[in-house]
Image (cartoon, grey):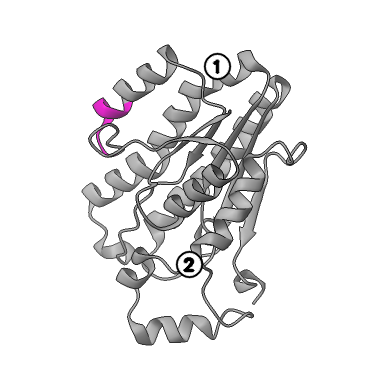
Amino acid sequence: MRTALVTGASRGIGRAIAAEMAAAGWNIVAPSRAELDLGDPASVAAYCKQLRDGEAIDALVNNAGINIINPLADLLEEDLASMIQINVTAPMLLTKAVAPGMARCGWGRILNIGSVFGIVSRSGRAAYSATKAAIIGLTRTSAIELGPQGVLVNALCPGYVETDLTYVNNSPAEIDAIKKTIPVSRLAKPQEIARVAAFLCSEANSYISGQSIIVDGGFTCL
């Protein structure tokens, strides 16, 4: 049985990915915040040491992230620092920690959950878009470096998804307006994102690497 580490698996997309992969026969490691606080560099360092010293991880899904919305003029430095730490630095260090074990096995999958806002953007998303664009850059470089060892690395970039975060960041009127900008006229369900994630992490994916897979109902086509 292969083992997958999924961050942010307590809700939303992360919970759906963990459930989808578990149903496909994966052993899921889903650390709680007490075990791994992505916003705390010391916690990330300790967990990465544990990963290096422990049993190999076959797939890493860097799902957890935060989105603090503010116009650039009002962006607080501490909010920017938190978003960089959680959305970029922690995934990069977790990737660095699991990659040697994957290389030794000659097989591995790393999936970074990005966002369409790493490709396009809107007002108030300067920091979020910057971190998600960084994740895409990390994905591409990791794919180049780890491909020779049998490790495939991809980014999955969802559009608008029915999650708590979406409804916190957008009013009901804004949600209705957003639906009108999506060709399929609705938000994605977490399970729809999870099915793509599970495929990218599976043995069925044998040649897709270094890609940013957009799952947005056609949002970025307009």
Q: Residue drawn 67% across and 40% down?
A: 210
Q: Is residue 102 above or below residue 206?
A: above
The image shows residue 116, relative to residue 101, as above or below, that is below
Quadrant where the N terminus is found in the figure: top right
Horizontal side, residue 35 vs residue 140: left or right: left
- Quadrant location, the C terminus: bottom right
Q: Which residue shows up at 40% across the image and 44% down it?
A: 87
Between 189 and 124, the one lying in front of the other is 189
Q: Main secondary structure of the magenta part?
A: helix
Residue 69 to residue 43: above or below: below
Q: Which mark is residue 142?
A: none
Q: Quadrant of residue 82?
A: top left
Name the spot of residue 190 as percent of width and height, x first: 49, 62
Residue depicted at x 65% and y 25%? 146
Point out residue 165 in the picture as x, y percentages from the top left corner: 35, 64
- Asked whether, in this view, residue 177 is left or right of residue 85, the answer is right
User: Which amino acid does the dot numbered 1 rest on?
Assistant: Pro
Q: Amino acid at mark 2?
A: Val
Position of residue 108 measured from the top left corner of the image (x, y, whole percent): 62, 28
- Foreground of the two, 59 or 43: 59
Report the span colored magenta.
39-44
Residue nearest the viewer, comparing 196 with 74: 196
Residue at the image point whose x is 58% and y is 29% from the top: 2
CA distance for labels 1 and 2: 33 Å
Q: Secondary structure at mark 2?
A: loop
Few, some or many residues within 10 Å of mark 1 (<14, 14–19, 20+): some
Residue 43 within the segment the image draws in magenta: yes
Q: Which of the numbered marks, if any, corresponds to residue 100? A: 1
Q: Looking at the rendering, which quadrant does residue 89 occupy?
A: top left
Q: Which residue is mark 2?
A: 161
Q: Is residue 71 left or right of residue 16?
A: left
List x then y, in percent, for residue 59.
Answer: 56, 32
